[in-house]
Every structure is written in structure tokens, then in C-alpha cells.
Image (cartoon, rainbow, N blue to C red):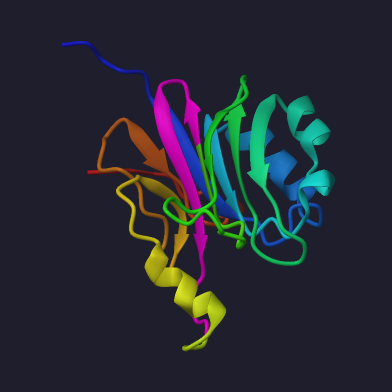
Amino acid sequence: MIRKPHVKIASYNINGINGRLDILLRWLKEDAPDVVCLQELKTEDANFPRKAIERAGYGAIWHGQKSWNGVAILSKGSAPILTRCGLPGDPDDSHSRYIESAVNGLLIGCLYLPNGNPAPGPKFDYTPLVSTSVCLCGRVAGIGNPCPADRRLQCHANRPRRLQARALA
């Protein structure tokens, strides 16, 4: 049997990447995840801190939006390969809540799907559109971070300050 190497995948609702960049960089240095999915960037693409993230040893792809939403995937030591930007099946997706990439042979999807939006309304109406078969890292409707049921992967709590790693059953 061929054993695959361990991959540490983490998800973090950063709630404003530029305002919390120092926290993110410190956490990347201390915990060194292989792949990071970030949600709620709250910045336009042009203002994403690419250079700082690269200096920390990570490649990045991102899908930003001013004041709202925004997602990114970071990969230690190499740049993720963008495979999809925007919600699958919705060519007019303007919410900047989904991005997907290939990272070292894995397909990684990053989704920001907040709950608590009033119904009916454009934010609430967007939620049912998300019905893909992609394994997602992210904060989904307040239920935590879904991760593949694979013992070789570790997931971390949504807040990196907690650094609560757990092996999956």
C-alpha cells in the first residue's frame, strides 16, 4: 500500500485580511499549515497583501470584494493553480464567496457562506445555489469547518488563535 504524505489544511474566517495581516503572518509561521482557506477578506483584488504572504513562504490566489465577502487559498512553498473563481453553475456570480484550486494533486474549494441573512433577500437567496460535490473548507452556515473524512488530513478551528488541531476519525 502506498502511503500519501500528511497534508495540513486549515480554514480561517479572517474578517478583513489587511486589518489582521500581522495575526495571519504570525499564525502561518507558528503553525505552518500546508494549505489555508481564508474567508471574508473584505478587500478588493488590487489590495490583497500578496507580497507579504509570499515573503511568509506561501503562494496565493484570491477572489476579493470591497467591504464584503472575499475568499483566498494559500499554499506553502508553491502557488495554487486556479481552477474556478465564482460559484459553479452561476456565470454571473458577483458575491466573491467561492474559489477553487489545485494544490499538490488535491482539488481545494474555499467557500464563504454566512448564515443569519434575512429571507427573502439577495444574500439569503444566494445560499441555495451552493450545491456542489466539492469538498469545501470554510465556514458554512455557522456549523464549523467541514473537512474530508480522511485520517491523513487535519483541520483546525476557525480561529487560528485557538489552534485546536484534531485528527479526523
Q: Residue 116 in magenta?
A: yes
- Between residues 8 and 123, which one lies in front from this camera angle? 123
Where, quadrant-wise, is the C terminus in this rendering?
A: top left
Which residue range is magenta in the image?
101-117
Q: Residue at x 35, y 35 (%)?
A: 153
Q: Determine if residue 143 is in view.
A: no
Q: Residue at x 40, y 65 (%)?
A: 129
Residue 165: x, y in percent?
43, 45
- Count of labels in the image: 0
Residue 148: x, y in percent?
30, 43
Res. 82 image quadrant: top right
Q: Residue at x 26, y 15 (%)?
A: 3
List the single residue furthest toward the left: 1
Q: Is residue 101 above or below residue 109?
A: above
Q: Residue 143 in magenta?
A: no
Residue 92: x, y in percent?
56, 58
- Dominant SS of magenta comes to strand
List the single residue furthest toward the top: 2
- Between residues 41 and 93, which one lies in front from this camera angle? 93
Residue 87: x, y in percent?
48, 54
Where, quadrant-wise, is the N terminus in this rendering?
A: top left
- Between residues 132 and 23, which one lies in front from this camera angle? 132
